[in-house]
Image (cartoon, rainbow, N blue to C red):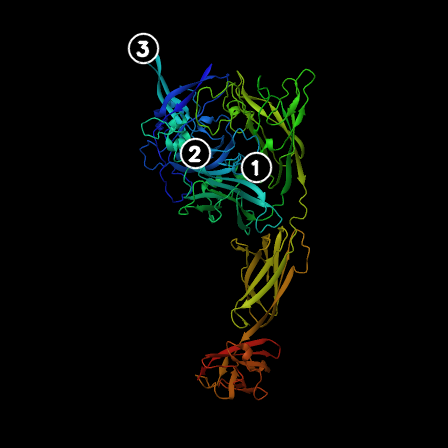
Amino acid sequence: MKRILPVFVSSLFILVGTSAQAQICQGSGAGPVNGANAVCTNFRVALIDIGPIEPGFDITDEGWVWVARGNPDPSLTTTRCVSGVVLSSNMASNDTPANHNSHDWVFHLEVDPGMQDALSNVNGPNDGDRDNDLVPDDEHQTVTPREIEVEWESGIKPSEKSGDGSLHYFPKWAWPSAGDRAWADGNWVFDCGHGKEIGHIEIDQETNLPKFVGDEYFRTEIHPARAVAAMRRQVATLTGSGTTPVPVTATDLYIHGGGGFVTDILNCGMSIILDGVDTDHDGNGDGNPDACPVKTTPIAEDFQFEVCLPPRPHPAASLVYDVEAGPGDTVPSVVPDIDEQPASAACANDGDEDPATFLYDQTTSLLVTIPLHGTGVADTEVYARRIRAGWIFPDPTTRHLTVTLQQMDLHNDHDDFPTDTGELTFFFMNVSTAPDEWARLSDFDIPTHDSCGALCFEHTNTMNDYDDDDLCCNGLLNFSGPVYDFYISGGRSFTIRANGYDQDCYDFHNNFGDHDLSLGLYAACHTVDITEFGGNDPMVPLPTTLEGYENETTFGPPDYGVGFQDLKARRLVQLPGQPGPTLTSDYELEVMIAEIPLGLEDTADLSVDKTCVADGEVALVGQPVHCTITVTNPGPGLPRGVTISDTLTGVGPFVVGPASLKVGNSAAVPCTATGSGTFTCDAGTIPVGGTGTVTVDVTPLAGGAYTNTVSVTTASTDPVATNDQDSATIDVFIPIDLDIHPGSDSNPINTDRAGSIPVAILTTPTFDAATVNFATACWGDDGAPAERDCTESHGTGHLKDVDKDRDDDLLLHFDMPAAGIDAGDTKACLTARTFGGVGVYGCDTVKTN
């Protein structure tokens, strides 16, 4: 049979600027766009015969037009953003050199609520490649579209058999993993290469024969993207967690205006696939396809997305985020704006239908804005950031694991003579919870002798020349890794995945980057996906020719399968007469899963300090004293079960106001009263290098000494116990009535003349002035206690009724200028103690000359 390649032609269309205002990606809430409105069919003018192709070989590929093109709706734009849960993530296996510089990396999103306006009405799960389904209109939309494909050229050419590629359109470190949340911004297009015909059959009135009446619909994509933020639950250390890893949302952000040849096609028209750019404007392409003047998408705009946080583990937990430059960053001067905000409904979309196991906090999230508008940043610059955000709080269920690839056993490479051996250098392994999720297996293969037997050709396996065990050989290949080192907590599972395909066929010619499509470019050969995990719904009937495989193993609580594990690949096959696919194995990966003891990662030398301060010069009966407890943690780890306990004792009654605790930047939380003058505060933990601060007011109701003792305890190891307790003594003074110059209202004081100033302590119904020890009295300047005169001029006190109320007051005399009163002072004060040692304090106004 022959397979034909659709080719597309378009007029010149230059990308115009879009709004520079950042818009958080929430959608309009409108329904899907009509996929029949795509202008794809206007460009389908030629078909090229590319020669014989083996049955089952799929060379279907696409052209693209912006959704906004030709659409009368002025609200539509050439670029837009989407966000949601990643359903699958893999290297595209049938991208042709005709319209690519390298293979696309493809991931599918189940979009967040309210974002259906980004989809076409034939987007997944309703879509289907060009299958000419004759589906009646009333039966078409049985499921609401909810999926969109995001594509971005990886930059890895077929000729590059290892490594991350040389172009770096979309580098491996930024690829999302299945199960991630992801945000993407880029060219919003119709995929013109994968149409779906929707309509019905009716009888032609002229021929009296059945004919199809309907339209061809096209799905929407973000292709190519210009910005992707892949967000996943991991466990990592943060500023403030020291050596203790905590649950975080890890975000890999990558912004770059280069998207590969598809950007040229969008900007210069699909005709350049064959004819090149129309340089003389005669309607025919006559230039090199690479001569398109616009090859990039602008990135000098503000981008904005939401980072959903792990569930808050404790009311006092402190929120921290760390930002570091990602690999290849060339824009170090632009700092992300990150603000705490109420979580949107999108944070409930975590791919898990069980509300009890939400991955993300339902109340708080981070709004991240990348302010590139006005910076003049070139389209070809790279803005790369890694953001780790979480609550500084230890999880006692944390485990430290490693996963190491040991060996692959290839049962069937589906390659026939003359190629015989598989070329599996586009083969990637993924561990969902690891800091670096993706690894290219050809970077780790160990050339392994393939024992094939006496009658078979023997050779040395590598990923670039891999023989299976289908006939003679053993199909074994050894690996030096990759080694994934990661933490996991909360009893959550982690997933090991593999993804790749046999690339010998049109990849064999290594024509990516050469866009001169000519006859005979493709050889007649057979290609097949070895694994294309996560991209197929096992509930959907599949044809027997499906070239899809799956290798995905999830390890969950309580046993993560420590030790050697065989991960068997599964080919999804729809067998005749069976309701669902049958699983057949094509290869196995052998991995070693090991657990590393955590050791003393939560060891912390806590210390506590207690201070109590009055509003005025001294603490007074009936006036609140403000006490502060400060707990610090120099590390090295995050302590667990931190509790602060406080006890107040004294000579008289007192009132302890409500105590509250604030840890780091968290909001204050109340402490719990446990008795008269006692309370406890559940801090949970104290950040490394940070503090937990308790504030409380104490109101004494009698004069004398009060002792406030605080202690801090932890369920973790605290190597120094001597600094886990502290005390503060509150010296409470009795307020007294003071009368300077008894009998005078103005209380004049001449600061230029020496002399004796009479000062009386008055007896009141609640205080007997005769109890004051005159020898302890100090009187003088209100604002400078150290300058006061502490020597009674006569060497004694005089009991005398100075206010004529028939009780004795205590009259004292102090010398000027020894009292420190200066011109302009308006008040003078006295401190003393009773014969019982209780402090007294009073002030009166003065008028200085």
Residue at label 3? Answer: 207
In the rendering, at what x and y percent does residue 620 appear? 54, 72
Residue at label 1? Answer: 437
In the rendering, at what x and y percent does residue 367 appear? 46, 46
Q: Which badge, 1 or 2, comes first in the chain's sequence? A: 2
User: What type is the residue that disc 3 sits on?
Assistant: Thr
Quadrant position of residue 81: top left
SS at badge 2: strand
User: Does the rendering let one see residue 66?
Assistant: no
User: What type is the residue that disc 2 sits on?
Assistant: Ile
Question: CA separation, marks 3 and 1?
Answer: 60 Å
Count neighbours of disc 2 (C-alpha within 10 A) and say few if under 14, some if 14 to 19, many if 20 or more: many
Q: Which badge, 3 or 2, comes first in the chain's sequence? A: 3
User: In the image, which is nearer the foreground, mark 3 or mark 2?
Assistant: 2
User: Would you say the residues marked 3 and 2 are in contact, meaning their CB atoms lie under 8 Å apart?
Assistant: no
User: Would you say the residues marked 3 and 1 are in contact, meaning their CB atoms lie under 8 Å apart?
Assistant: no
Count neighbours of disc 3 (C-alpha within 10 A) and say few if under 14, some if 14 to 19, many if 20 or more: few
Residue at label 2? Answer: 222
Q: In the picture, which quadrant includes the C terminus?
A: bottom left
User: In the image, which is nearer the foreground, mark 3 or mark 1?
Assistant: 1
Count neighbours of disc 1 (C-alpha within 10 A) and say few if under 14, some if 14 to 19, many if 20 or more: many
In the rendering, at what x and y percent does residue 394 appear? 60, 47
Q: Nearer the viewer, residue 708 or 213?
A: 213
Question: CA separation, marks 3 and 2?
Answer: 43 Å
